[in-house]
Amino acid sequence: MSSARSLFSLCRSMGPRPVRPKVLRTARGAMLRRDDSHFLLPIIAWLLSAVAIFPSPCAAERDFGLEQAAIHNAIESVADSVVQITTIGGLDRVGETVLSQGPTSGLIISTDGLIVSSAFNFAQRPSSILVRLANGKQVPASLVARDLNRMLVLLKIENQEDLPVPVAVPAEDFAVGQTTIALGRTFQTEHVDVSLGILSALGRMHGRAVQTDCNVSGANYGGPLIDLRGRVIGVLVPMSPQPAHEGPESEVAGAEYYDSGIGFAVPLEQVFANLERWQSGMDLHPGKLGVGLKSGSPFVESPAIVSVWPRSPAAQLGWKAGDVIVGVDGQAVATQTQLQFFIKPRYAGDKLTISLRRGSGETAEEFDSEITLAEKLEPFRHSFLGVFPATATEVKGVAVERLWPASPAATAGVKPGDRIEKIGEAATPTLADAMVAMRSLQTGEEVTLSLERGEEAITLSAKLAGLPEEILSSDDLPKLPPAEAATPALEMKSIKLPEFPQEAKYLAPKANGKLQPGLIVWLAQSGELPDSALLSDWQEICRRQQIVLLVARPSSESGWATEDLEYLEALVRTAHGRFNVDSQRTVVVGQDKAGQLAYALALRRRQLFSGVATINAPLPRTLKIPENSPSRPLAVWTVLPKNSTFAPLIKQDIVQLREAGYPVSLTEPTPSATGFDATTKATLLRWLAGLKRL
């Protein structure tokens, strides 16, 4: 019995427990009577077969020994190619990620001293790099180039002797479930660090990586993931999928998964495929088409183009809004996710053949475009017509309530009361259709407007401008509805999300079937107005202007922290669903440190906001300003007090935001103004009202 126990214990350690044959369970459950002598022969047969079914402990131990020998041989065959890397100088952290201060790992990929490692190990931009070889020799290294698509770096050392280069596993030999071994050379220079696991998944990160459940962390980032034959599957890296609206991918993205059983490796075969141009010293950048796609789930939505970046590869080939990408290099594409698998692994300068469909029905045509991916796109700047649309009209077309002074629409001759039925070639039966049509047009473009004025059809031509930064006076904005007499007072109510400790408060007006409410998300700080004061200050504003005021507070008494972003996103999504808010009048507001968090929230989650307003707050210093998105314009309003110590930083941030394509309105109050006073609040409301525009 003890032998059987040890056998099954060993089997569990090596893999799934063997399934016993049904006859064994039947034999155990049988009631053998004295006159069942005819049952003796089957029992004897079962006993004989059991010898074959269950190998002896010695056989299992022999198999286990063979596996250990295979692992040992695999490690030995590649260990001399694994090096230890020490970086000196540079940053201590990037954003909230503390960078490794100890040695890291790398992999030799050429006999003359080229070494590949993870970009995570070099995010601090070190001033000096030292490499220690397997034989203990330490030599200086230079950084040749970076791969900003797969987050790798290429180093070069000088060595008198040829260095050992491992063999790459061909992609066709990858198999989910196969044994994998993660190696690094960090803790002891004379030995490699080892973690065993399996290959969990292929084609991760849109085809740029494979996944393993080996322990992967700063200890072995840059080291190899190998198979049992001692061949290298890939180079270990942290990775995390990064939506385009969240900004450029980071060298430290995915580091939070360390030792979690979720690890990634860039196939070495891909590294070798790009080595010739990489070793020339040219950084490798992700390739870009220059199009904006229809919003929605990328797993479901087709790659329908809604906007084309000016002077992008797509624009140069004449691609248009409304075109649909249906194939890449002869392979069919049906969803945006499928398209990403073709585009994401490619680099700037790569050439592709894109198949597009233009039009619909019998008049649709399909054609191929030979396109060269770009490294960088010009900032996208949303176009502006200058129309305040009327709300809740029962007729088709966008009814014009008011015109922005001196706007393209006003200059072209559009008048209040007109109904816009087409913008360019796009029909605009609803405001949503008009917004989509504007996203496909570029600043400076001449566009034809098809209007109905009374019983008369009119065609006008307007030259589109960029989004304005001016905050209009109350006289130039659409008029507010008259105050209702005997309206019940609003109550301050609570929203408590079960997965977070803090509670938010809100004031919401009575539902108005004619007008969706706007949403102001106020990031409160400790010591600010109590609920009673907020109720008094905002009661009439929320009722009269149809605005939901949502007051969020930090989880800690010490104030807002980056960790609160998850809570705020969930809170705002809840508010969107509960109040059915107007997407053109949804803003987040914060002062000082809360203003910095407001920037981070709005720029990373632009699908939730049309604007961000800050008071005396620079951008978070570690925040990379994301590319302006054609799918959702984001306006910025910043208040810069006269005596602000942050003035140089805030002014520098304004320049950078404008260069990235974001319209920034700046208010510099008088020296006597203090924080969020009545004048600042009135300006905020006028800025918010001006966002509902075409």
Image (cartoon, helix red, strand yellow):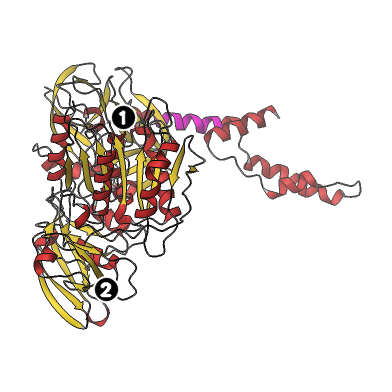
Q: Which residues are magenta?
A: 60-72
Q: Which residue is mark 2?
A: 397
First in residue order: circle 2 vs circle 1: 1
Is residue 233 among the parts visible in the rendering?
Answer: no
User: Of helix, strand and loop, which one carries label 2?
Assistant: loop
- Residue 321 falls inside the magenta stretch: no
Name the kind of residue labelled 1 in the image. Answer: Glu
On the question of residue 242 being in view, the answer is: yes
Real-space Cα separation, disc 2 to disc 1, in angstroms: 48 Å
Q: Amino acid at mark 2?
A: Gly
Q: Nearer the viewer, residue 610 or 153?
A: 610
Q: Nearer the viewer, residue 641 or 364?
A: 641
Tag shown at residue 460: none
- The quarter of the picture where residue 302 lies is bottom left
Label 1: element kind: loop
At which x and y percent is residue 202? 36, 47
Mark 1 lies on residue:
96
Name the quadrant of the N terminus: top right
Q: Main secondary structure of the magenta part?
A: helix
Comparing labels 2 and 1, the label whose residue is closer to the camera:
2
Q: Position of residue 339 (x, y in %)?
A: 27, 58
Give the number of callouts: 2
